Amino acid sequence: MAANGCVFCAIVNGKAEAGIVYSDDDIVAFMDLQPVTPGHLLVIPRRHVVGLSDLDENLGTKIWKVAQRLATALRLSQLRCDGVNLFLADGEAAFQEIFHVHLPVFPRFPGNNFRIDADWRPRDRIELDQTAAAVRNGWNRLIDPSAHTLSS
Amino acid sequence: MAANGCVFCAIVNGKAEAGIVYSDDDIVAFMDLQPVTPGHLLVIPRRHVVGLSDLDENLGTKIWKVAQRLATALRLSQLRCDGVNLFLADGEAAFQEIFHVHLPVFPRFPGNNFRIDADWRPRDRIELDQTAAAVRNGWNRLIDPSAHTLSS
């Protein structure tokens, strides 16, 4: 199931060094080499899966569960942790760099260097309702069992 | 279960307007009023829960499952969506602004205005291993059933 050249598969298979913090039959969590803050973790499935759309839902929920526990573990650790971000990047346009799905979990504290920026102006009701309709249309295509493999 | 003054509880209870895209007995998903990009959604539990540490794990996995499906729904919609981010802010230090836990899901595409910045320099093995040990220490406190209510 390992993908050639995938560094996360190499970590899963013990062929690349990593600071492992959690491991079970399906999931591995380890320290990011280039942390946003000390304690920055990546939660990944052992199985090579590129992104959310091809991730089995049950495996996805296992990733989430470990990430949620790690968020609390960070708060209970001696590391600086006044808050926690989970920031998943699905696709190159969303800043995904390693194409083995991973859920980053990192601690935050006043004075850390993490910044986000966007055009956050409020949108009007008409625009929001049109956008909601477009998303529901995508959702309806999703739950058509003839078109998708996701279980209900 | 609604918290006084919580705008997300008001949306759940139909007392504030929102572009709802998904709703079930536990979860509601709706359009963010100030989207990073068109299609920016928030997935929340109906129940008022502040953050990850007080979120029941089963309810957490329901939030995740809806978010994962919405990520695919965005890709299947007519909205611009070449990638998707999930960006959960847990605590004020992590940019949480509404203290009712929510998992944002937003589409990304080349030329969008979303930016992140951090001090991403690689850390050495000793530092990473020390940090991993600190996280494992937090984790060990987490799974002590006498100290925590999370189920195994």
Image (cartoon, coloured by chain):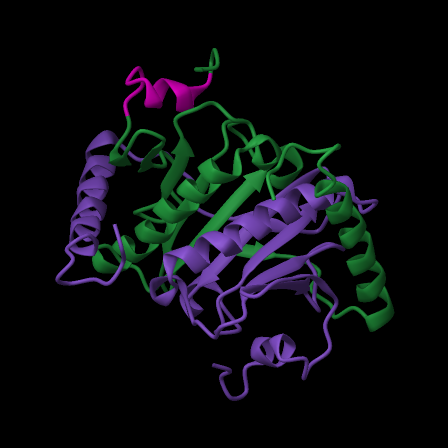
Chain colours: A green, B purple
The part of the image, by quadrant, that contains residue A128 is bottom right
Residue A36 colored in magenta in the image: no
On the rendered structure, is A79 left or right of A117?
A: left
On the rendered structure, is B43 left or right of B20?
A: left
Residue at (39% x, 26% y) in the render: A46
Residue at (16% x, 55% y) in the render: B141
The part of the image, by quadrant, that contains residue A121 is bottom right
Q: Position of residue A47 (x, y in %)?
A: 43, 24
Residue A12 colored in magenta in the image: yes
Q: Position of residue A84 (x, y in %)?
A: 39, 57
Q: In the orientation shown, which residue stands out farthest toward the top?
A: A4
Q: Position of residue B125 (x, y in %)?
A: 24, 30
Q: Nearer the viewer, residue A117 or B64?
A: B64
> Can the viewer see residue B109?
no
Q: Position of residue A138 (x, y in %)?
A: 77, 46
Query: Does residue A43 lie above or below B45 as drawn?
Result: above
Residue at (39% x, 38% y) in the render: A43
Residue at (47% x, 48% y) in the render: B118
> Can the viewer see residue B67?
yes
Query: Does residue B146 lie above or below B75 as drawn?
Result: below
- Looking at the rendered structure, the number of numbered marks drawn on it comes to 0
Query: Does residue A10 lie above or below A85 as drawn?
Result: above
The part of the image, by quadrant, that contains residue A104 is top left
On the rendered structure, is A123 left or right of B139?
A: right
Residue range in magenta is A6-17
